[in-house]
Image: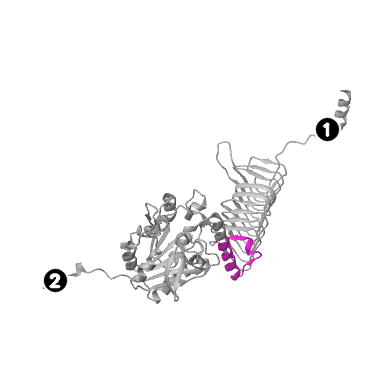
Amino acid sequence: MAKDDSQDKKPPVDTKKLTMIILAAGKGTRMKSPLPKVLHPVAGRPMIEKVIDASKKAGVSDLRLIVGHGQKLVRSVVEPMGVICFAQEHQLGTADAVRSAQIETIEGDVVIMNGDHPLIEAEDIQKFVKVFRDEKCDLAVVTAVVKKPDAFGRIVRHMGQIKAIVEAKDASADTLKIKEINTGIYIVKAEVLAEYLPQIKNHNAKNEFYITDLISLCLEDQCKVMPIKASAKVAVGVNTQSELAKATKLLFLRKARRLMEEGVLIIDPNATYIEESVQVGPGSVIYPNVFLKGRTKIGSFTVIEPQVFMSDAEIGDSVQIRAGTYIEQTIVQAKASVGPYARLRPETNIGEEAHVGNFVEMKKVSFGKKSKAGHLTYLGDAEIGEDVNIGCGTITCNYAADRKKYKTKIGNRVFVGSDTQFVAPIEVGDDAVIGSGSTITKNVPASALAVARAKQFVKENYTSKVSELKKEE
């Protein structure tokens, strides 16, 4: 009987499998912040989230993140995203960080990248990997030509071929003149990484193990090493608060340009702040100094005037949001108008063709179709019917002495006079009229008139008599 040697055979290597190793263990000392560098927000989200999202969209099946400084905080953000974290116990350089990712367990191709590249996109990663595979490389480094190389490692070539990457701190004066830099992104075959990474030495100014030394080691053994040129934006990393602001600005501009390509009119893209997750329909107009965050969704032909802030809002078609308005977790339905200087707080729903005017605040309110609250009003924990008029200075007194909140319910076509207080819980029926200056503490039936205010008392010639008394004194 022939010997069954199936147990001795290794499973075939999946050459199409793509692993990403993201380096995020550094302290980020130049940020001058107690927050781990990769958690600093860029255009509204931690920069590491942007790198992870781009990696996933690019087809990376195995995401490994190297953590160190502030790792508890970093893990709390990335692990819910399906990322496996590996700790770099000591800060001994980039090669040591990669070694922490258990490289012996990886198959296929590996992308190595820093976690502070918030401008990277899935298309960029896919392009680099495609070139790497098409050219049948063993190792590739992504490079870019920049005007001010500063602290970037320089790409040293001979006869057009890459010969080495020299860190700025180890470079000669002539080498520092080179404009082509190392972006910190590498693609390498897993078996090549496993063979050569352990050979890297720490013979340099900082006594650290540099991943860049892979280049010279692979070249010495006649491996195919190739530089892949990319646009300068791929090289944008974040090491200081100034660079953080620059990256944020570039991402906001990118989002604005994409929206304009889809038919959104943005008056000044340089003064508009729209996060990547926001959706805006064609034909809408965005004025300067508008900030749109989170899951905000805006329909078509809607106008957003200056100084508006929105977070997780849903705005319908043909809505006008006037200047200075603050909206969070609110729905504003088609053809409604809000502001100027209104505040709509969470769980509020503004009906079609409704009007919410200046200095009106609402929270947990259902505000019916064609209803109006013109100005200086607070409505909280309320259900307002259709075609209701809420007069100036009206408030719902929803918070009681027992520290509980109670609901106000107002029916359709109710007229509420100015300076009215509704002491909840209370209900007002359809077509009722509430007299101005009333404090309503009892339910009002449909079609009724309710007036609750002190009786007016008039004493004639009062001021003249007071004046005479003062003279006598």
The 10 Å Cα crowd at callout 2, few under 14, some 14 to 19, many 20 or more, is few
Query: Which of the 4 image quarters holds residue 253?
Result: bottom right
Q: Residue at x 59, y 68 (%)?
A: 257
- Secondary structure state at the residue bearing disc 2: loop
Residue 18 appears at what percent x and percent y? 38, 67
Q: For mark 2, what is the residue?
A: 3
The 10 Å Cα crowd at callout 1, few under 14, some 14 to 19, many 20 or more, is few
Magenta stretch, residue numbers: 249-275
User: From where the camera sits, is residue 3 visible?
Assistant: yes
Q: Residue at x 47, y 58 (%)?
A: 48
User: From where the camera sits, is residue 83 visible?
Assistant: no
Which residue type carries mark 2?
Lys
Q: Residue at x 58, y 36 (%)?
A: 401
Question: What colour scheme does the image use?
Answer: one colour
Q: State the residue lying farthest toward the front.
A: 173
Which residue type carries mark 1?
Lys
Q: For mark 1, what is the residue?
A: 459
Residue 378 appears at what percent x and percent y? 65, 46
